[in-house]
Image (cartoon, rainbow, N blue to C red):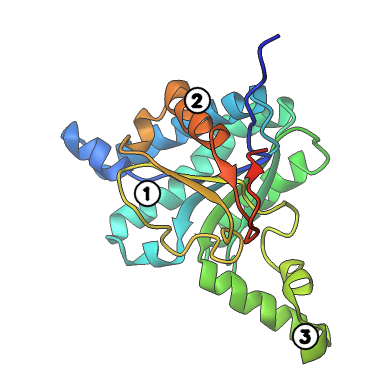
């Protein structure tokens, strides 16, 4: 019997390259972001069929507000459109949606769309899709500390375990694998705490072109690694 390759329980993705994808086609950047949403929806199904339990994607960082106003506005509108277009299908497929990020600085309309997506899928037991929107890793850590203090924890009670329970991703294990598309070799303030021992794969593929073959190539690279968590003895990828 052929051995089944190890797959990550939790996959995180920095979906980079939408703007460059559009530029190569002489299109406005918005069309790249729209194509990127379509790619994400396809990838969710691919992850489910491969046994991945958690998928966390970097959709909009806290630094992305510095982009041109028309691009930011288009991205906000695209979220509303994506929820309208895909939410029913994702809910039917058993996907649970969780939005992680700072909700204080987004519009009420966007909050309502997020709340609708989370409410409709709250009891689903399939893949958990965590969408990092208006998210930053430093913000996440600072907020976790603030929440711990607000709950009355003193210095002796704050440790790795207790602080992790206050992070935006407390509902999921730390990622086993991070994929970044678009050819950049950095994590860009994404899941700074959670990526401490995560395996990483960097792809030159622009996000809208990232397909099942590209996913399988990244998963194969992960399966061939021996993971280390600060120990002498390696641990096979799980």
In the rendered image of this protein, does residue 188 appear above or below residue 2? below
Q: Which mark is residue 6?
A: none
Q: Position of residue 113 (x, y in %)?
A: 61, 48
Q: CA distance from mark 1 to mark 2?
A: 31 Å
The foreground one among 93 and 53 is: 53
The foreground one among 141 and 202 is: 202
In the rendered image, which residue does mark 3 sit on? 150
Neighbour tally class for label 2: few under 14, some 14-19, many 20 plus, Cα within 10 Å: some
Mark 1 in CB contact with mark 3 (< 8 angstroms):
no
In the rendered image, which residue does mark 2 sit on? 216
The foreground one among 26 and 161 is: 161
Q: Nearer the observer, disc 1 or disc 2? A: 2
Nearer-N-terminus badge (1/2): 1
Neighbour tally class for label 1: few under 14, some 14-19, many 20 plus, Cα within 10 Å: some
Rendered-image quadrant of the N terminus: top right
In the rendered image, which residue does mark 1 sit on? 74
Q: Quadrant of residue 235?
A: top right
Q: CA distance from mark 3 to mark 2?
A: 43 Å
């Amino acid at each position: 019997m052929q051995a089944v390759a190890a797959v990550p329980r939790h996959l995180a993705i920095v979906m980079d390259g939408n703007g460059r994808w559009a530029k190569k086609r002489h299109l406005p950047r918005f069309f790249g972001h729209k194509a990127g949403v379509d790619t994400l929806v396809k990838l969710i199904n691919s992850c489910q069929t491969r046994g991945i339990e958690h998928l966390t994607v970097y959709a909009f960082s806290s630094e992305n507000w510095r982009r041109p106003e028309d691009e930011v506005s288009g991205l906000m509108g695209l979220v509303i459109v994506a929820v309208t277009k895909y939410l029913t299908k994702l809910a039917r497929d058993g996907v649970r949606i969780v939005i992680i990020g700072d909700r204080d600085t987004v519009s009420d309309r966007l909050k309502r769309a997020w709340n609708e997506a989370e409410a409709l899928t709250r009891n689903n037991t399939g893949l958990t899709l965590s969408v990092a929107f208006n998210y930053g890793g430093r913000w996440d850590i600072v907020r976790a500390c603030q929440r711990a203090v607000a709950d009355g924890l003193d210095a002796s009670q704050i440790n790795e375990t207790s602080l992790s329970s206050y992070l935006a991703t407390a509902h999921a294990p730390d990622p086993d694998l991070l994929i970044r598309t678009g050819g950049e070799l950095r994590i860009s303030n994404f899941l700074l705490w959670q990526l401490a021992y995560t395996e990483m794969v960097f792809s030159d593929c622009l996000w809208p072109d990232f397909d099942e073959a590209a996913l399988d190539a990244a998963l194969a690279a992960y399966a061939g690694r021996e993971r280390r968590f600060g120990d002498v003895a390696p641990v096979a990828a799980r």
